[in-house]
Amino acid sequence: MLEALQNPILFSNEKNDMKALNLTFTFGRFLLATPFKLEGKRYVIRGITIFLLISIIFQAYVSIASRVSDVSTSSITFVMVDWLRIILDMLFVAICLMNSNIFMMLHWRLLYRKLAHLDFLLRKHNFQVKRKLFLFYCEILLAFISFSALQIYELTIVYRYRGKDGVISFIGWTISQFYMNFILLLTYNFAKVLRHRYVLLNDMVKNTNEGELLNATIVHKLDEIVILYKTLYAIVDQFNKIFGWHVLLYISVSVMYILYAIMFSMEVKFIMERSIPWYLLSVVYILSLVILIISCDRAEKSGLKVISTCYLLHESIGDRRVKDKLLQLVEYAQQWKPHFSAAGFYDVNQSTLTAIFEAVITYLVILIQFDLALK
């Protein structure tokens, strides 16, 4: 049953990390966060998607309307952060639905084809992923168990302090968190797939200086590495085109939830019984940001290692043709170096974490000063 539902282009892949990625894509089809159907007529799927979009907008409107009365009992800054959080939740889910079943169909086809083409190119190199498939599946299962536990915990908090009105807005909250969890899992597995293949390319470059290979053979191997590196760059480029806005809004929503949790603690005068749950939720969102960003950063750095390896080999190899080919590979690697982009606004790597924490502190200070000025 599961095999019939998986994407046929990716399902034929025998690599363990690709199977885990394929399972994630398959799960996304049921959320309509990945294309339910790539070929043929898709009128029904588009109609369902549009209906879901209207429902999400209506749910966001109801959530905001139910909080209008909070203006008289809470600080205006807290209410503004709460409304902005609801709007960002709506936008995030809307982007997930639209980019998978209304727009970006060409980019989805190109992404699947590039992944299949990469697998075809790697077959002759006997590439294998050493990590067991069971461990990949355990990570996916752990992610959804953690998500379910978090949602039950959040529902308990919301119902306890906001009653039935809070539960209405919690529906939108849960939907957004479900899609956020999926995007985190997808990005994590996708970055891992890329990292394993960039490590292979780096090892292939190192192996050109081992044994008694003819110089012509080394040049040919380096030409193959250039083709593989270019294919990986094309895959990253397609991923950025499809998921750039997902990543941008994921980071924005996470930052907004962290601010909301801090503002809520201030709103209840830091009463421990009511503040501790939101502090714990802040930790969860911070950890999710760290996992997302570090996974992208590791894939980027693994791709850049090829450049340093080429420079090291350039010093130890005497043949001029091989030296020139290594420098050519460096030039291509610098031009095609991997990077994960947040819709083109900034690259997602380790430096992004510092920028996010600085932004949270800055926004928090501004909100506090604004609140004090109004009082």
Image (spheres, rainbow, N blue to C red):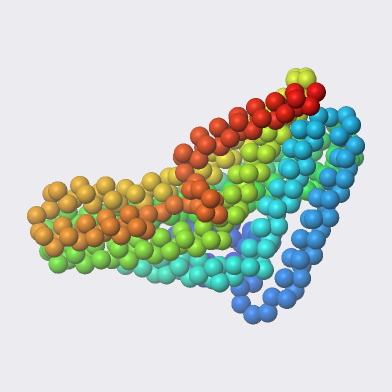
Is residue 100 something one can see in this rendering? yes
Question: Percent x, y for residue 334?
Answer: 33, 54
Instruction: Judge from the rendering whether residue 331 lies leftward or rightward of residue 234; answer left or right.
Output: left
Q: Residue at x 69, y 75 (%)?
A: 42
Q: Position of residue 319 (x, y in %)?
A: 10, 59
In which image quadrant can residue 323 be found? Answer: bottom left
Q: Residue furthest bottom?
A: 40
Quadrant that contains the C terminus: top right
Whether residue 294 appears in this view of the structure is: no
Name the residue located 70 percent from the left edge and 47 percent from the top edge: 88
Question: How many labels, in total?
Answer: 0
Residue at x 88% of width, y 43% of height: 66
Q: Residue 158 in the image: x percent, y percent?
A: 82, 35
Front-most of 353 and 368?
368
- Placement of 192 over or under 231, stated as above or below: above
Residue with the most extreme left position: 318
Q: Quadrant of the N terminus?
A: bottom right
* 368 left or right of 3 in image: right
- In this rendering, the answer to whether 282 lies above or below 49 is above
Check the image and name the residue furthest to the front.
373
In front of the other: 166 or 54: 54
Relative depth, front residue between 90 and 145: 90
Residue 329 location (% of width, % of height) = 26, 59
The residue positioned 76% from the left and 66% from the top of the image is: 50
